[in-house]
Image (cartoon, helix red, strand yellow):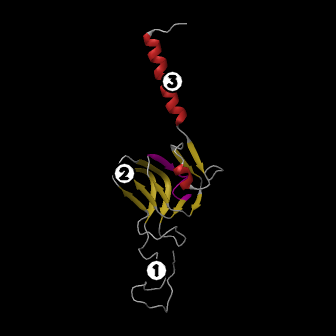
Amino acid sequence: MKLSGFARLLSAAVLSSWTTFAAAAVCNVPSAPHPTIQEAVDDVGCTEVVIAAGTYVESVSIDRSLTVSGASTTGTTIEGRLAVTGAATAVSLNDLTIDASAPSAAGCFAEALDVTGGAGVTSNALVVVNGDGDACLIFEDGFETGNTTAWSGTSP
């Protein structure tokens, strides 16, 4: 069967749309292929990362366009920092909390959400809790004064 020029053009457009749609993948965390958020973010086959309800003690770096969604702001919490970088990077963050103030936060960060290098972030139902800036103190008054008589409440 021979297709007319219009039919060939239409079938090419449908095939192109189907290929684009088929390439989009939702990756769930935790799952066997993606036990951590960072592993799902690093998988270039994932166009959307869906995080189950729970607390995830990890810091995450995103340098590509991606959608990251949780169960809710009270149900899904990343205890650590989320860094988004890159001029062509557009990230959508939905239904989650990023908390750098938690004692178990992965790392020592004053800013829970760090967007640099011209990256763009959009959000819907996002809570960001910055650290107090003292997350890395070992001694009550820090390393600067050398007073080692009292321990702080947090350590890296």
- Other-residue count near label 2 (Cα within 10 Å), few / some / many at <14 / 14–19 / ≥20: many
**Residue 123 left/right relative to 57:** left
Tell me the residue at 44%/61% (across/down). 128
- Other-residue count near label 3 (Cα within 10 Å), few / some / many at <14 / 14–19 / ≥20: few
- Mark 3 lies on a secondary structure that is helix
- Mark 1 lies on a secondary structure that is loop
- 1 and 2 marks in contact (CB < 8 Å): no
Q: Which residues are magenta?
A: 65-76
Tell me the residue at 60%/51% (across/down). 34
Q: Earlier in the sequence, mark 3 or mark 2?
A: 3
Q: Which mark is residue 98?
A: none
Q: x and y percent of residue 68 in the render?
A: 50, 50
Q: x and y percent of residue 101 in the render?
A: 47, 70
Asked if residue 87 lies in the magenta stretch, the reply is no
Task: Estimate the spatial distance between the alpha carbons at disc 1 and disc 2, rounded to whole Å.
Answer: 31 Å
Which residue position is annotated with label 2?
119
User: In the rendered picture of this protein, how many numbered marks are placed on residues?
Assistant: 3
Q: Which residue type carries mark 2?
A: Ala
| Residue lying farthest to the left in this orientation | 118
Which residue position is annotated with label 3?
15
Asked if residue 74 lies in the magenta stretch, the reply is yes
Q: Which residue type carries mark 1?
A: Leu
Q: Quadrant of the N terminus?
A: top right
Q: Earlier in the sequence, mark 3 or mark 1?
A: 3
Task: Estimate the spatial distance between the alpha carbons at disc 3 and disc 2, rounded to whole Å.
Answer: 31 Å
Q: Which residue type carries mark 3?
A: Leu
Q: Earlier in the sequence, mark 1 or mark 2?
A: 2
Which residue position is annotated with label 1?
137
| Front in this rendered view, residue 110 or 75 | 110
